[in-house]
Image (tube, grey):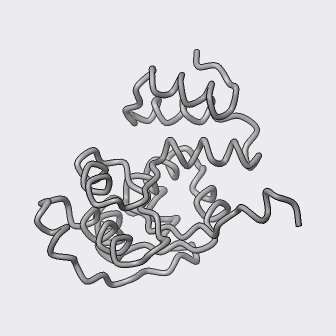
């Protein structure tokens, strides 16, 4: 066993709607399955995605994927942040389970996670991790595809993250 294998901690992710939706829009939803050792989706997130059109790629992915759907007891500390039901469920699940990471993009939810020391990653981080683990050959084209789908990403953050983590340049 090499040092990389020794240091790799199992990845346990609880995923919110936005990362599923945006990754499915660019046909990269399987990255989630490939990167995490265990993934769950709260029922509130499934309900949010299923409220969309039947042709929505995220809805189709959830219907055909092996992702376990979990019922979450909302934590009152997180409930007090007045987030959406999906974000509240995701953060409650991760807050109650040591070693679980919230996969969220919403700014208010990310501030809550940071305030409560809940590990988190967003769609940008998922793509960068996929590049670092050589699951994808380049991150920049996928990040451009996300932007083309209307996902808001800050150029400065993308440029810095790509250069630091993958050595790629941002156009």
Q: Residue at x 40, y 36 (%)?
A: 151
Q: Residue at x 53, y 72 (%)?
A: 39
Compared to 109, does 163 lie above or below? above
Q: Residue at x 61, y 65 (%)?
A: 36
- In the figure, residue 3 lies in which quadrant? bottom right
Q: Residue at x 59, y 49 (%)?
A: 27
In the picture, the quarter occupied by the C terminus is top right
- In the figure, residue 2 lies in which quadrant? bottom right
Q: Tell me where residue 170 appears, x and y as whole percent.
A: 58, 19
In the picture, the quarter occupied by the N terminus is bottom right
Q: Tell me where residue 125 appears, x and y as whole percent.
A: 52, 45
Q: Tell me where residue 106 appears, x and y as whole percent.
A: 30, 48
Indicate left or right for 83 with 20 as reference. Answer: left
Indicate left or right for 93 with 98 as reference. Answer: left
Q: Tell me where residue 81 appears, x and y as whole percent.
A: 14, 60
Indicate left or right for 112 with 32 as reference. Answer: left
């Amino acid at each position: 066993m090499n040092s990389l294998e020794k240091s790799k901690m199992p990845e346990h992710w609880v995923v919110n709607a936005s990362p599923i939706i945006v990754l499915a829009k660019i046909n990269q939803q399987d990255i989630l399955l490939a990167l995490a050792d265990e993934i769950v989706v709260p029922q509130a997130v499934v309900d949010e995605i299923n409220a969309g059109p039947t042709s929505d790629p995220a809805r189709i992915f959830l219907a055909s994927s092996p992702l376990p759907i979990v019922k979450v007891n909302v934590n009152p500390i997180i409930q007090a942040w007045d987030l959406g039901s999906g974000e509240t469920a995701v953060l409650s699940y991760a807050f109650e389970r040591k070693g679980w990471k919230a996969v969220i993009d919403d700014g208010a939810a990310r501030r809550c996670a940071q305030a409560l020391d809940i590990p988190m990653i967003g769609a940008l981080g998922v793509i960068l991790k996929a590049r670092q683990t050589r699951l994808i050959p380049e991150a920049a084209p996928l990040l451009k595809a996300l932007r083309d789908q209307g996902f808001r990403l800050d150029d400065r953050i993308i440029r810095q993250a790509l250069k630091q983590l993958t050595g790629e340049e941002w156009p």
